[in-house]
Image (cartoon, grey):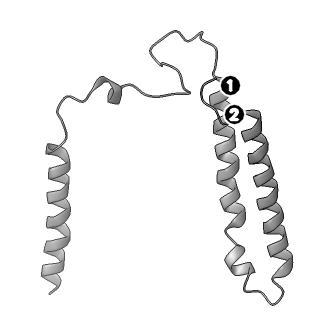
Amino acid sequence: MLMIYILLTTTIPSILLALAFWLPAISPAAEKLSPYECGFDPLGSARLPFSMRFFLVAIMFLLFDLEIALLLPTPWAAQLDSPHPPLIMVTAILGLLTLGLIYEWAQGGLEWSE
């Protein structure tokens, strides 16, 4: 039985590695070869102005992504003997983030083009 497990755990990954090596296109498109950095063409001039809109959207993404880290303990906090203080804090965090999102939306900070 152990020999079957060892055979399967070596054969299946070997087959998948061989398929992953041979199935992709030999000559990928130019779009796949060029890196995408900061919302501008990386092959052009380095003296172009930086896209502030891209920067603001990236910061907003990080802000709302960090919100998840703040909300991760919520299921455990809800099981406490007194769950009200942590749940009030979670509600306050969600309320502030919702107000910030509404403000950014109203100011047009989520629009990519003008």
Q: Give how far across and how far down residue 55 sits, in percent.
A: 66, 31
Q: Quadrant of the N terminus?
A: bottom left
In this picture, residue 41 sits left or right of residue 108: left
Q: What is the three-letter code of the residue carrying label 1?
A: Met
Q: Vertical placement of 37 versus 66: above or below?
A: above
Q: What is the three-letter code of the residue carrying label 2?
A: Leu
Q: Give how far across and how far down residue 50 sits, in percent.
A: 64, 19
Q: Nearer the viewer, residue 75 or 92?
A: 92
Query: Residue at position x 76%, y 38% from top?
Result: 106
Query: Residue at position x 76%, y 54% from top?
Result: 98
Which quarter of the picture shows residue 66? bottom right
Q: Nearer the viewer, residue 45 or 83?
A: 83
Residue reaching furthest to the bottom: 81
Q: Nearer the viewer, residue 42 or 85?
A: 85
Q: Quadrant of the C terminus?
A: top right
Query: Residue at position x 20%, y 62% from top?
Result: 13
Q: Vertical placement of 80 versus 107: above or below?
A: below
Query: Residue at position x 19%, y 57% from top?
Result: 16
* Neighbours of disc 2 within 10 Å: few (<14), some (14-19), many (20+): few
Q: Are marks 2 and 1 in contact (CB under 8 Å)?
A: yes
In this picture, residue 107 sits left or right of residue 75: right
Residue identifier under label 1: 52
Residue identifier under label 2: 56
Callout 2: helix, strand or loop?
helix
Q: Give how far across and how far down residue 79 sits, in percent.
A: 72, 86
Callout 1: helix, strand or loop?
helix
Q: Vertical placement of 97 versus 75: above or below?
A: above
The circle on residue 6 is none
Q: Nearer the viewer, residue 41 or 46?
A: 41
* Neighbours of disc 1 within 10 Å: few (<14), some (14-19), many (20+): few
Task: Say how many tags the image has.
Answer: 2
